[in-house]
Every structure is written in C-alpha cells, then in structure tokens.
Image: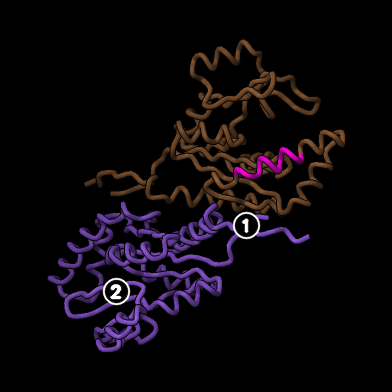
Chain colours: A brown, B purple
Amino acid sequence: MIKRDFRKFCVIISGPSGCGKTTLCRKIAEKNREFFYSVSCTTRKPREDESNGRDYYFISREEFEEMVKQNKMLEYARVYEDYYGTPMDPVIKSLQEGKVVIMDIDFQGMRKVKKKMEDSVAIYILPPSIEELKKRIEKRKDSKENAFKRFREALKEMDFWTAYDYVIINKEIDKAVHEIETIINAEKLKRERMIIEREEE
Amino acid sequence: MIKRDFRKFCVIISGPSGCGKTTLCRKIAEKNREFFYSVSCTTRKPREDESNGRDYYFISREEFEEMVKQNKMLEYARVYEDYYGTPMDPVIKSLQEGKVVIMDIDFQGMRKVKKKMEDSVAIYILPPSIEELKKRIEKRKDSKENAFKRFREALKEMDFWTAYDYVIINKEIDKAVHEIETIINAEKLKRERMIIEREEE
C-alpha cells in the first residue's frame, strides 16, 4: 500500500531585513515539537543581545574552516570578514527523527541547500508594503545612515522572491505563522513524499 | 507591491471507485462558499437516486455533441455508448468570481484539464487499504459479479496516483476534507499565484 514517508524535509525561510522572518521561524519552532529550528554558525562576535546556541553558534575561524574541510556545513558564505553557515549534523539528525527542519537563511544559502536536498521547500517572506518595511527598519536602534543602507539592501534582496516556491505577505504575525504551517502540512501530502509499502497479509 | 492573484484555480479530485471522492468533493463545496463544485454533463440515463444538476446534468446526445462542436466542454470522454464531460462556462465564470473550482473527474480528464489550465491542482484519493476498498465496493447494492469487476477496475485505476500533485489517504472523511482544504490554502500561497501591482502613492 502507499503511505506517507516518515522522513520529512527542510523549510527554508528568506526575506529582506525587516520582514519579520526570524520571529516567524522562532514562533513556529516553539509551537510544535515536530519542527527543528536550525541555528547557524558564525565567526563574527556576538552582539549584546545575542546568545550562543539561540541566535548563532559563535565559533572561531579555525573551527569554521575545519567544519568546511570536513564537509560539515550544509551551506556557508563569507560576508566581508566573517563566515556564516548551516551545520549539517543537526539537520540530518532531525530529518532522521521525522522532524521538519526550519532554516532562516538567504537566497544564496537557499540555492545551495536546494542543490543538496532537492525536496526542500523555499518560502519568501514579504513586508505588507515598502512603506511598512521602511518604518520597521527605521524603528531599530541604528544610525540613520545604516538604516538607509539596510533599507536599500532590503529592496535589492526583495527581487529574489521569484525564485521561491511560496510567498507570504507578513502583515499579521499569527496569520503568517498559520500560513507557513499550512504550507508545511500541504507539502507532506505531495505525491513525491509518498512511498510504496507492501501490504501486511 | 506583490500581492496574491484574485483569480483562483481548478482542483481536480480523482481516485478509484470506493475511495470516497464524491462525498469528499460535496463536503468541501458545501462547507465554503469560496468553492464551486463543477457538475459534469452526461448523455446516460439518470439512476433512481440521481438528480439533475446535483449528480450530473442529464442532456441528450445532440445537445452534448453541439457543446463539443462549440468548444464548450473543458474535457469530455465517451465511455461505451455514453458521453461524459465538464461544461466550460460555469468553470470560467466561477474562476472569474475568485472561486476555487472542484472537479470530480478521472485520470484522462485530469490530463486534459491540466493541458488547458496549467495551474490546476490534481489530488488523488486513496482508500486506507486494499482490504477496505474491497469492503466498500462490496457494500454497495450490486451483483457479486459487478462488484468483482468494479474492484478489479479500481485496482487498475489506482496506478494513476503517481501522475498527481498530491495524494490523500481517505481513512477518516473529516481528516481528508481538512487535508484537501490545507492543500488549497497552501496552493494560494504559491509563488506562481502572486502578481505584481504598483504601490499606490
């Protein structure tokens, strides 16, 4: 008989700075023990409000390069002086446990993960309007100059939405969380995720 | 800004005799006014418990052939002496009203609709087990011989599940209804169903 595969898949969440993607990912992972939120590694120093293992795994450059050499990064990138990457082992372990893995990574990371794990699902989060995005970015504690730079980068980043499987407009956080859950539940019903098993006699 | 397309899509539901697809389609269409259940046309005589406009539109062979000639059938097929087909106009009208159109048609019909409306979603309904399928078919008021024939046909029909976008195992009707709704709601969030609209200034 045909049944659903126990093994699940990765859900990649991207979006411009200010779209609310990190909050969305956390909310989903907290709500349901079936989800595993993949925490990235970085070689940059933690900011004041960041904690190790929650926001990132803060590791040394040597450790990072060693992981890359041992093929233990599912994807990674260098941004200016620092490395950022998704450690492979927790992802594989969670998938084997039948969990859905949630990743908050960018467009380049999405492309790399999709290459290695073709059945991954990519969701793009958009702000409800450009005006709202600007407001959200300006609200953060940052210099005016930096805010403008980040806004400009966010606009550029927004062009990538066309490369994703799904698009969510994050107007209300609870609605957006529900929409991501709906996508995940529908994805479980995809024909490709069914396996054939001999009927017991 | 990017927003969701008002125009919706067709949802094609197929499955072997005894999988419960007709009940599922009806339940979904009754639950929500956003859904339109497409009633097929046929030239065969109505059975005792069937009513015109609910189970089928019972029309004459001349009417049917005229509709085909005028390109007013979205898909149709001849089964032995009778025609079966999906009338085009109600489908187009419902889509223009922003409704999701639900169709209970077979594999051949699915292929024809997908050719004309590429963004249609195809869902295959499976019984929970072969044993259960056999039981359901035997329960119907029919001769033993006919039941056996229908069971054999159902098994053959079941091979088509691999051509569909989603697969649902209909063990509990309410769960299956919920799963179809989940698929439809996720499909609305597909990137392909987003359109770009200039922001109001």
Q: Which residue is mark 2?
A: B76
**Alpha carbon distance from label 1 to label 2:** 35 Å
Magenta residue span? A151-160
How far across and down, in percent of the image, does residue B67 sit?
33, 83
Q: Say which residue appears at 35% left-offset and 80% top-offset.
A: B55
Residue A64 drawn above or below residue B151: above
The subunit carrying tag 2 is B
How far across and down, in percent of the image, does residue A170 sit?
68, 51
Res. A57 mark: none
Q: Say which residue appears at 60% left-offset and 43% top-offset.
A: A160
Residue A172 shows up from this direction = no
Q: Earlier in the sequence, mark 1 or mark 2?
A: 2
- Residue A57 in the magenta stretch? The answer is no
Q: Which residue is mark 1?
A: B196
Would you say the magenta stretch is mainly helix, strand or loop?
Answer: helix
How far across and down, in percent of the image, does residue B69 sit?
30, 81
The crowd level at tag 2 (other Cα within 10 Å; few <14, some 14-19, many 20+) is many
The crowd level at tag 1 (other Cα within 10 Å; few <14, some 14-19, many 20+) is few
Residue at the top extreme? Answer: A62
- The reply to whether callout 1 and callout 2 are in contact (CB within 8 Å) is no
Q: Say which residue appears at 62% left-offset and 51% top-offset.
A: A168
User: Image quadrant of residue B169?
Assistant: bottom left
Secondary structure type for disc 2: strand
Circle 1: residue type:
Ile
Q: Say which residue appears at 65% left-offset and 59% top-offset.
A: B197
How far across and down, in percent of the image, does residue B38 sit?
41, 75
Residue A63 shows up from this direction = yes
